[in-house]
Image (cartoon, grey):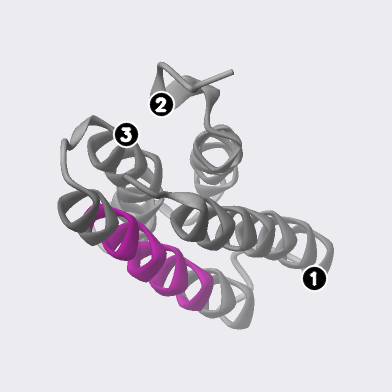
Amino acid sequence: MAITSFREIVAWQKAHNLTLEIYRITQQFPKTEEYNLISQIRRCAVSVPSNIAEGFARKSLKDSKRFYLIAEGSLEELKYQLLLSFDLRYINQSEYLQINERAEEASRLLVAWKKAQKY
C-alpha cells in the first residue's frame, strides 16, 4: 500500500514524538536559556519532521532528498545540543540517554526512508 500522507512515514512519526519530548524537557531549562539554547534546540527539533513533511510533498526525487538531507542535518545538530544540555547539567544522564536514543532511532529511520525512495 502506498503512503499517501507524511503522517504515515514512520521516520516522521518518530521525529514528531522526539519534538514533543524536546518541548517537554526544555521546559525545565533555566529561564536564562529561553532565547538561547531552548530556542535553538526547539528549532532544530521542529526542523526534522517539518523537512520530512516538505520532502514528501515534493514531486521530484532530487528535490525530496534535499529536504531529507536537511532533516538529517538538523538531527545531528540536535544531538549536539542534547549533549551540550547534558554537559551543562540541564538534563540528567537518564534523560540524555533516553532522548539521544530517540534521536538516533529517528535518524536510522530517516536514512532508511531516504534510501527507499525511488521515483
Q: Residue 60, position in %: x, y?
A: 17, 45
**Residue at which label 3 appears:** 53
Disc 2 to disc 3: CB gap under 8 Å = yes
Residue highlighted by disc 2 = 6
Which residue is drawn at the image coordinates 53% and 23% (left, top)?
8
Query: What amino acid is labelled 3 in the image?
Result: Ala
The first of marks 1 and 2 along the sequence is 2
Quadrant of the image containing the N terminus: top right
Give how far across and how far down residue 6 sits, in percent: 41, 26
Within 10 Å of disc 2 (Cα), the crowding (few <14, some 14-19, many 20+) is: some
Q: Is residue 44 left or right of residue 10?
A: left
Q: Residue at x 52, y 71 (%)?
A: 79
Q: Secondary structure at mark 1?
A: helix
Above or below 68: residue 84: below
Q: Which residue is mark 1?
A: 93
Q: Real-space Cα distance between discs 2 and 3?
A: 5 Å
Q: Amino acid at mark 1?
A: Gln
Mark 1 crowd level (few <14, some 14–19, many ≥20, 10 Å Cα): few
Q: Are marks 1 and 3 in contact (CB under 8 Å)?
A: no
> What secondary structure prevails in the magenta region?
helix
The boundaries of the magenta stretch are 67-80
Please name the residue shown 78% across and 57% down the image. 98
Task: Tell me the tag on residue 31.
Answer: none
Alpha-carbon span between mark 1 and mark 3: 31 Å
Give the side of residue 91 with respect to residue 63, left or right: right
Image depth: mark 1 or mark 2 in front: 2
Relative to 8, is 109 above or below? below
Rendering coords of residue 103 (x, y %): 61, 59
User: Badge 3 local density, few (<14 within 10 Å), some, or many (20+)?
Assistant: many
Is 61 left or right of 74, judged from the image as shown? Answer: left
Quarter occupied by residue 74? bottom left
